[in-house]
Image (spheres, grey):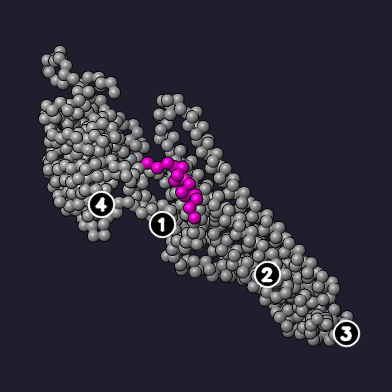
Amino acid sequence: MFHDPRHIFEAETSKPQNVSQTLRRFAGYFRPYWRRYLGVLVMMIVSTWAAVTAPQLLGQAVDCYLVPPAATAAFEGVSPTLTVQPPSASGPAVQATDSACWYAEVPLTATTEERINGLAGLVLRLLGLYAIGSITTGLMFYWMTTSGQRVLRTLRVEVFHHILLLPIGYHVAHESGDIMSRVTNDADTIQQAVSFALIQVISGGFLIVWVAYKMLSESVAYGLVALAMLPFMVIATAWFSAQARKAFRRTRVRMGSVNAELQESISGVREAQAFSREDENIASFRETNAANRDANIRAVAYTSALAPTLEALGYVALALVAVAGGYALLEGQALLGETVTLGLMITFIAYVQRFNQPVQQISVLWTNIQSAIAGGERIFGLLDVVPDLQDAPDATDLPPIRGDVVLDDVWAEYEKGEAVLRGVSLRAAPGETVAIVGPTGAGKTTLISLIPRFYDVTGGALTIDGHDVRQVTGASLRKQIGVVLQESFLFSDTIMENIRFGRPEATDDEVIAAAKLANADKFIDRLPDGYQTSLGERGTGLSQGQRQLLAIARAALANPGILILDEATSSVDTRTERLIQSALETLLRDRTSFVIAHRLSTIRHADQVLFLDQGRIVERGTHDSLMAKHGMYYGLYMSQFRRQSPTEGGDGRETRAAPAPA
């Protein structure tokens, strides 16, 4: 039943993860918004087109306007109407109508003023390209972010819904702070990636591919020189990414531990102050936080190392382009059989810069992506937890129950091979009250937890009105069972809504009637806002007895066919106990009830009393019959109570004595 958190940590951080599967699952959440993402794709294409076209215009500005080939042609004695560059042994002369100046045909006899005007037009078109790129990028980010927020809302709701469906055993084995971390911190890492990093990485990757294609289409030889560092970039990215992903997986788990310790420390602040444990708790939190810090530093170290590595390789690529192109120009030689002009070299330098820019951006944003993948793995890991308790495929709704509960040779265990209940058999007829007593660890709470199917029997059968609880839907079963625990949970809402929790459709008059039945109306009326009084977390501001009365009112309003009371009066004073006992007598009437009693005086009128010891029923009967046997029940009862002489008032009532030594 209980698991070491260290084992859970090792299991989550050491198991192999399938990144492609995680990404495919993310894609499934984005699929409903495919039209919007189609628009994002269009904007990405337009933006990338603008980004890769600008370097071409820069090259033409040099070859066609700033360094007019007419002068060179005239110097070589070539007709200015035929060529735009001098002939060379490495290739034929280029005609004026060639694609070298596809923006506009520039007559070689054009005047300086005409060239300036043409250059001005080209600059305006460059500015237009930059404006188009900015607008499309803005739209792309807006559409991506709004869609991403919708996806995150869906994911959070799905995770929350799944958490509520997980069996009680899962919540016992896992810290609530860690579970909360998956809905909050892990989802936040995904939000950061979706809002900014993801679109940058995708558009950057798209730009890298397009620039590579343009370089190879302009000049295969020069393009191969410019892309010479690409294999090294891929290798570096793959290795650093793999290491960073492992490290970020550990950081997400460590963050869950931080949240778990924080939640536990805040919830137990009263105990910490009462026992002067503040310094020890601070030291423990400091240690947990330090482990989270170290995990984050390790993760950031890998992602930080990736950026300068790629930047250095980018500079090497830029140097190769400049050296190879410059050598070809200065020596008047072709590069692997292809002519290089000054404009082409400038174009390729701009291409390489364009190529390196998204590579470096991706390396910076890769931190967010890796963290988001790790967060996604943890979220999907939670969603992949298959509840131990599920409705059978052929499960039917349980009809309105009469309350005939039968346990037939029931066995139950939390850990395989360690039985908690051993062959328990009993029958509670409709309307009967069954009291369950015994020492700590005897299996009392386990027994009552089987009735609403918080846990499943591992042997034997448990039926209600002849229906095996494993063959009916859990919702229809629990809807007809009321539970009042020793520590009743109240929500941060009004008293009215807390009582109405189990039956939301109840009217205000019905809520008030339930409060009166539970003897809670008197203290509620004394509150400043009455039934509209807002409670703090867990009912802060109310006494334990008042919280119990509200829990009884909640159960009374739900009007269950079966009622379970787990030591409902063990933590209240004698006066409040009488109020609660009076309310319970009314609530138990004509209703099958199971009562775990700490104070045995509260169960003297039970129809059956079961004494559990080490998972077995060792005694059963009424209070009087068990007392007459002078057995284990008698010994437990007498350890709590003794017959005293009549009080001064002469009422002869049984009064509580000090508990016997353990």
Q: CA distance from mark 3 to mark 2?
A: 34 Å
Residue 34 position within the rendered picture, expressed as x and y whole percent measured from the top left: 46, 67
Q: In this figure, which residue is indicated by the disc labeled 2?
A: 54
Residue 631 on image: x %, y %: 17, 28
Which residue is denoted by mark 4 in the rendering? 474
Label 1, residues with CA under 10 Å away: few <14, some 14-19, many ≥20: few
Which residues are drawn in magenta? 2-16
Q: Amino acid at mark 3?
A: Gly
Residue where numbered disc 3 is placed: 77
Residue at the far top in the pictured view: 648
Q: Amino acid at mark 1?
A: Thr
Q: Seen in the image, is 296 located left or right of residue 163?
A: right
Residue bearing the label numbered 1: 154
The mark lying in front, picked from 4 and 3, is 4
The numbered disc on residue 511 is none
In this view, the mark in front (4 or 2): 4
Q: Is residue 155 above or below residue 292?
A: below
